[in-house]
Every structure is written in structure tokens, then in C-alpha cells.
Amino acid sequence: MALEGAERVEEFMTEAQVFFLATVDGDKPKNRPLGFHLLKDGKIYFGVGDHKDVYNQMDENPNVEIVALVETDFLRYYGKAVFEETDDFANAVVAESEFLQSIYNDETGFKLAIFHLEEATAEIRDITGKINESYNF
């Protein structure tokens, strides 16, 4: 059975392992590698530290793009970042990972900010740029 929409995007990112999040800093593009993603209730969630420039950039301009590569196919997933309004989800995510607990804790004061994309499009393209799959969220 073929996967649809969010499940397919989640599968692609899991296979890629590392993906890149692009934001805008003033008038300059900024990219950074990320690895955390979670499919829950039909949405794909991501996390960034609320103490980092990336969080401020997304707060200023929520239009972002995520890119992942698997062999000669790549994913472009773009839309508006929407942060979760409560810390409950982020606290649950951190509680499941010793690595995240070492960063996001009372001692550091850092918090994980969880977001998903709305008004989003995901395209899986081949190396020539041809769109092989496209999903709207």
C-alpha cells in the first residue's frame, strides 16, 4: 500500500536521517541541519531551541523550507511554521530523549519549541527537478 501525504514525507525524512531547515535572517537565507521529526495525528512536528537564532527568525518570518536528500531524490517541504502554544508536547518529547534532556533542562534554562507547517506543500523530486510526488497540507 502506498503511503500518502504526511506519512510519505515522514518516511522520506526518516530515510534521509538529516534534513535542512531554511529560514530568512533579515534579507539573507540561513540553513541548518536538523534530525528531529515526529508524525502525530497527521501532522509532522519539528523542534528547535527557543534560545536560538532560528527560533527568532521563524518568529519574525514563519515561511520556511525543509530539504532532505535520499540517493538522487530530494524532498522540498515548505510552508508557514506554527509553534505549539503550550510546553506539554515539547516536555514529552524531551522526556523521551537523554540527548535532548542534556540540552533542554532547568540548569540550562533552554526550552524546545515544537512546530509544524501549515499552508504547506511537499514535493519529492528527482535529480533533474521533475516532481514525482506532490502533497498539500
Image (cartoon, rainbow, N blue to C red):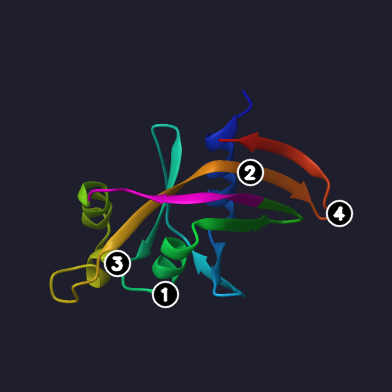
In this picture, is 94 found above or below 125? below
**Of the image marks 3 and 2, the number of the one nearer the N terminus:** 3
Q: Which residue is mark 2?
A: 122
List x then y, in percent, for residue 21: 54, 63
Say if mark 3 contacts mark 1, CB within 8 Å. no
Of labels 3 and 2, the one closer to you: 2
Return the disc, 2 or 1, that comes first in the chain's sequence. Answer: 1
Disc on the earlier residue, 1 or 4: 1
Is residue 84 inside the magenta stretch? yes
Q: Residues within 10 Å of mark 1 (few under 14, many from 20)?
A: some
Residue for badge 4: 128
Q: Earlier in the sequence, mark 3 or mark 4?
A: 3
Specify few, some or many for label 4: CA neighbours under 10 Å numbering under 14, 14-19, or 20 or more.
few
Label 2: few (<14), some (14–19) or many (≥20) C-alpha neighbours in 10 Å: many
Q: Secondary structure at mark 4?
A: loop
Q: x, y (%) of residue 84?
A: 32, 48
Kindly report which numbered mark, 3 or 1, lies closer to the viewer in this rendering: 1
The residue under label 3 is which amino acid type? Phe
Quick one: 18 or 26, which is closer to the camera?
26
Q: Do residues under tags 3 and 4 come within 8 Å of each other at their CB atoms?
A: no
Q: Which residue has dot 1 on it?
A: 53
Identify the residue at horizontal 55%, vertical 75% (top origin).
Answer: 26
Q: What's the magenta region?
A: 76-86
Q: Which residue is mark 3?
A: 99
